[in-house]
Image (cartoon, helix red, strand yellow):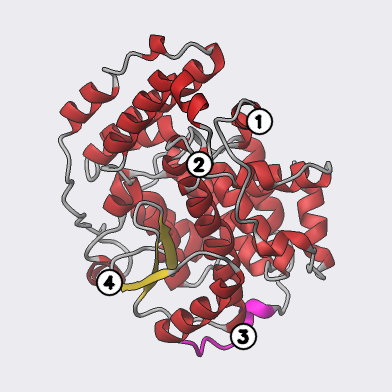
Amino acid sequence: MIEQDIITENANLFAIDKNLDRLIKRVELLSYLNPLNTEKEKHRFFTSKYTEEPIFKYPKQKFNAFKLQRLLFSHKLEKIEDDDIRALYQSIIYYYANMVQCAEAIGEKKKFFYNSLRLYGTPKQKDVDNARFILHLKNEEDLESLEKRFTALDAQAYFEDFVERYDFPLNIKLSTSIAADAMVSNSTQTLFIKKNAKFNENQLKTLANHEIGVHMVTTYNGLNQPLKIFSNGFPKNVETQEGLAVFSEYMSGALTLNRLKILAYRVIAADSLIKGFSFADTFDLLHNQYKLDRDKAFIITLRIHRGGGYTKDYLYLTGLKKIYEYYKQGNSLSPLLTGKVSIDRLDSIKKLQNIGLASNSVHITDSYSVNKNTNSSIDFILQNLR
């Protein structure tokens, strides 16, 4: 529990942080980015023999973008005395202002695309080379090839059992309007499962360690922090969060070559977006040139092209590389679990902890205690990413 004298000494900081929290909670980008008519447009696209571009519909935004941006920039950050903390909050305001612009522009192709680039950047050539390196490796029979015999209700029961190792509640909802098979909503502390999805046993293990073991862990750790920015998210937190989540898959022994190839396909798809490919062009690249089955090719293409061009997905592989290297250097992962934080802001996290403005992680990812990976091919890949 934070001491009252620390709160009193930093009254201006806490006032700004509290007001930012009130504003930021209105914008969780992914909640607006999942198309409402995915299955209908998928059927139309397949029926047209992959020629008619899907026309996706998105949830209506519940905020006034102009007013929200004006309020974000109205904060008097000069009242924060510490230079480093003031600089952190300045970067946070710019980050969320970009996110507001991005959410406002969903469905407006060029406008959304350029705002997405400001938030997530683009894959570099070395990222594309890493993806190609993974995709050139020979397929192997692995846990991903198991029969998909589990329904969304089976998945719900599995996750409810899995979460018992953690000391936090799990709210689960079935959904027909998410692009992934499962995803966490940070703002509502809810795990959504795609209603019509089917899973094999290793996919359930993968999703549990990814979504609950990291995304839910950092959600609840963030809520335990005295400063709300840990809960809402630091700039560039996505790369770190997804890196931690895939690393949790690796440490639990659930990460497979096929799963790594999916992450590599996402990099290739994001690169195609940067090169000006249409939805049909990216799908053709994945399905006809890389021989990925059409359902997987469609989902990856959807994830990259939704909203008008969403580059976030290349960060799963870059994030995994950064977290793997950080861990191999003997560093503790605990500071990166304190909330929705970024490895680039590690010094800020430690400083806030040292001066009593941040607490240690209450919940620690279960899989990080022992490395259960037994697949030497996975280690070979991770050791050789550039």
SS for dot 1: helix
Query: Measuring 53% from the left and 13% from the top, which residue is drawn there?
Result: 82
Question: Which mark is drawn over residue 225?
Answer: 2
Residue 13 in the image, given as x and y percentages of width and height: 42, 22
Give me the C-alpha separation between circle 1 and circle 2: 13 Å
| Position in image of residue 271 (x %, y %) | 50, 43
Q: Which residue is mark 1?
A: 350
Please name the amino acid that badge 1 sits on: Lys
Q: Which residues are magenta?
A: 143-150
Q: Mark 3 or mark 1, which is nearer to you?
A: 1
**Which mark is first along the chain, 1 or 4?**
4
Badge 2 element? loop
- Residue wearing tag 3: 146
How far is disc 4 from disc 2 in space, using C-alphas? 40 Å
In the rendered structure, which amino acid carries the disc numbered 2? Gln
Toward which corner of the image does residue 356 lie, by quadrant?
top right
Q: Distance from label 3 to label 1 (Cα)?
A: 43 Å
Tag 3, which secondary structure? loop
Residue bearing the label numbered 4: 39
Whichever of callouts 3 and 1 sits on the residue coming sooner in the sequence is: 3
Q: Nearer the viewer, residue 127 or 312?
A: 312
